[in-house]
Image (tube, rainbow, N blue to C red):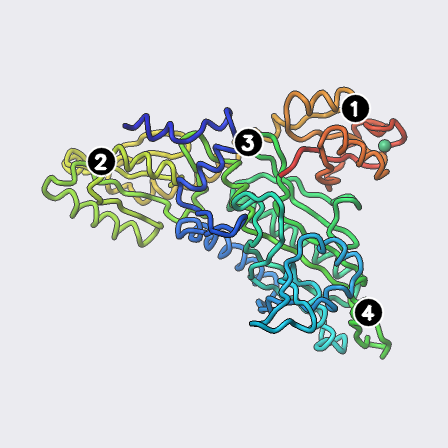
Amino acid sequence: MEKKFVKEVTAMDEDFAQWYTDIVTKADLVDYSSVRGSMIIRPYGYALWENIKGALDRRIKETGHENVYMPLFIPESLLQREKDHIEGFAPEVAWVTHGGTEKLEERLCVRPTSEVLFCEHYKKIIHSFRDLPKLYNQWSNVVRWEKTTRPFLRTLEFLWQEGHTAHATDEDALEETVKMLNVYGEIAENYLAIPVIKGQKTEKEKFAGAKLTYTIESLMHDGKALQTATSHHFGDGFAKAFGIQYTDQNGELQYVHQTSWGFTTRVIGAMIMVHGDDRGLIIPPKVAPTEVMIIPVAQHKEGVLDHAYELKEKLSNTFRVGIDASDKKPGWKYNEYEMKGVPLRLEVGPKDIEKNQVVLVRRDTGEKLFVPNEELEVKITTLLEEIQQSLYDNAKKKMEAKTHVEKDYDSFKKTFKENQGFVKAMWCGDQACEEKIKEETGVTSRCIPFEQENLDENCVCCGRKAKHMVYWAKAY
Ligand SMILES: [Zn+2]
């Protein structure tokens, strides 16, 4: 029975895409809806998102931002105000053409992102240097009509936050862009236990309408990269397109300098693909909907259930604790909560009660510990911290093992043919090389990392003088 349960999940090294699909549905994170590419986020998946969101929202507020809410619809004329922006988004915009039975005079787009809405609003409310900076954020859903979709990674509609700020100077805006990228890095590394590479996107890969885009990139179990979050510096491009000006201290009119930055439900996909194994999800304790799941053993015996519920009540003061007192067999329950990635399982039966102890089992390592009741809270605290740290350390080790250095093009191509991962290689800065690499290998530039290394004098592709070291990878 136990074996059969595990077999329902495709082995990750056999077919990683199928493994992913198995996990997201069997761990009750999502269900498919009747609209292609749209997903239902089920309670367990939503609780996970709420924990991630909670941690990020705190940091957004601590860094001085206020939450607002913008409308869902954008008039076509407004979206077209900034040329690069509309060109970037046009292919994936959903349009509303009718209100009830009446055809609308102007089409409305369902927001794919809200830059233009914030710009329109900022033009109205920013007049003087005293009005700056404006540090707004919104939590919302957006729609992008994607052709191929996968739960969390790419869906027609997804949840996110988008920060939109306006500043007096270009330097202030740049500082904000870096600050928020670092906040994203903190959430990814400290909460989701996902190591990231921080850097700048190339011109080709930057956000539509941005002066520059910063990104955090991470590496999945299968060696493909995932853009985990981005932060954009707009300079005064949008301000000029929308006429957002303020009067400075000398009474002169100036354009504002803007940023935007976004973090989405996509990170749940990253978390699954970085930590999961053949038995299911592994959720880092800091964001786990349930940190400790209590499974009563021989619960029909007198006193067992009462004791288990007492434990739950006591531990709930400190931890997120669940209990499964259903009539299913303990073995079934063990599998179920391993599938759901609960960091710690607590087993308690008549013998344990007699010995004044419980059994704790770690989801990440399978290690089993007998813990005296009086040490329980301290032990759980330590174990959760250890699990959190060890997930990060292991992910980092895996990422480093899958990061290669390449200096000539043949060997660059060979590496991507044989195994995937990050390749660090030098680049001349010419988009032609970037396009050639993409065309011939399917590999894209992930970022120009802030931590540069001088690996070689020459571009890996054309051999001309190199300008930057770049992280390359196949990507989700
Ligand atoms: Zn080149």
Residue under numbered circle 1: 407
Q: Residue at x 51, y 28 (%)?
A: 15
Q: Residue at x 18, y 38 (%)?
A: 356
Sequence-first disc among 3 and 2: 3
Label 1 to label 2: alpha-carbon separation: 57 Å
Q: Earlier in the sequence, mark 1 or mark 2?
A: 2
Q: Earlier in the sequence, mark 3 or mark 4?
A: 3
Mark 3 or 4, closer to the camera: 3
Residue 59 x/y as whole percent: 56, 57
What's the residue at 57%, 72% (across, down)? Answer: 101
In this figure, which residue is indicated by the disc labeled 4? 255
Instruction: Name the residue that disc number 3 marks.
Output: 221
Mark 1 or mark 3: which is in front? 3
Q: Are marks 4 and 1 in contact (CB under 8 Å)?
A: no
Q: Is mark 1 within 8 Å of ligand 1?
A: no
Give the mark nearest the N terminus, 4 or 1: 4
Give the image quarter of residue 112. Answer: bottom right
Residue 207 in the image: x percent, y percent?
73, 51
Label 3 sits on a secondary structure element that is loop
Residue topped by disc 2: 329
Identity, as a three-letter code, of the amino acid under mark 4? Tyr
Is residue 429 at least partly visible in the picture? no
Label 1 SS: loop
**Residue in front for this viewpoint, 62 or 408:** 408
